[in-house]
Amino acid sequence: MRKQNGKIKSDSMAKRARRKLKIRKTISGTKEMPRLCANKSNKHILIQAIDDETGVTLFTCKSFGKNVEMSGCKKDKAKVLGVEVASKLKENNIDKAVFDRNGYKYTGVLTILADSIRENGIKF
């Protein structure tokens, strides 16, 4: 994880960048226990399962794109994505993962997403 060059003008983005660097110093994923990196925008959510030892993304789940048919609010999308992530992890015979909130605060959509993954049998 590289530190950004230059000064970040927005206070909230600077705080998020600091949290992101602090989280990535301590969290790392392996093939048996991948890092689940969550990204969010105002409309959509993206989750990647990453093996940091080899630098490979195992799979990606997202709430947007050509083949994805999701509607409703972002909280509903988070529940559906949690079920989808858990099923893909189980297909790969993985029952543990590390949750990387990517500098976002652990509230709202991220809480719902993490709870949905836990309810479907994956341990953080």
Image (spheres, grey):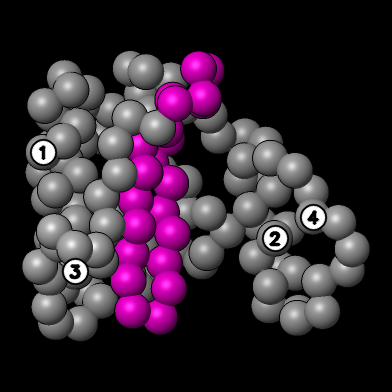
- Tag 2 or tag 1, which sits nearer the N-term? 2
Residue type of the residue flagged with mark 3 = Lys
Q: What residue would you read off at disc 2?
A: 17
Residue type of the residue flagged with mark 1 = Ser
Question: Do tag 4 and tag 2 residues touch (Cβ < 8 Å)?
Answer: yes
What is the C-alpha distance between the residues marked 3 and 1? Answer: 15 Å
Q: Residue furthest right?
A: 6
Q: Residues within 10 Å of mark 1 (few under 14, many from 20)?
A: some
Residue type of the residue flagged with mark 2 = Ala
Question: Do tag 2 and tag 3 residues touch (Cβ < 8 Å)?
Answer: no
Q: Kindly state the secondary structure of the residue where label 4 is placed.
A: loop
Q: Which numbered dot is residue 4?
A: 4
117 sits to left or right of 18 = left
Magenta span includes 42: yes
Q: What residue would you read off at disc 1?
A: 87
- Tag 2 or tag 4, which sits nearer the N-term? 4
Quick check: can you spot residue 116?
no
Give the overall secondary structure of the magenta segment.
strand
Q: Position of residue 87 (x, y in %)?
A: 11, 38
Please tell me whether residue 104 is drawn above or below residue 51 in the rendered image. Answer: below
> In terms of image quadrants, where is residue 13?
bottom right
Q: Kindly state the secondary structure of the residue where label 3 is placed.
A: helix
Q: Position of residue 80 (x, y in %)?
A: 13, 60
Q: Which numbered dot is residue 77?
A: 3
> In terms of image quadrants, where is residue 118?
top left
Which stretch did the figure color magenta? 35-56
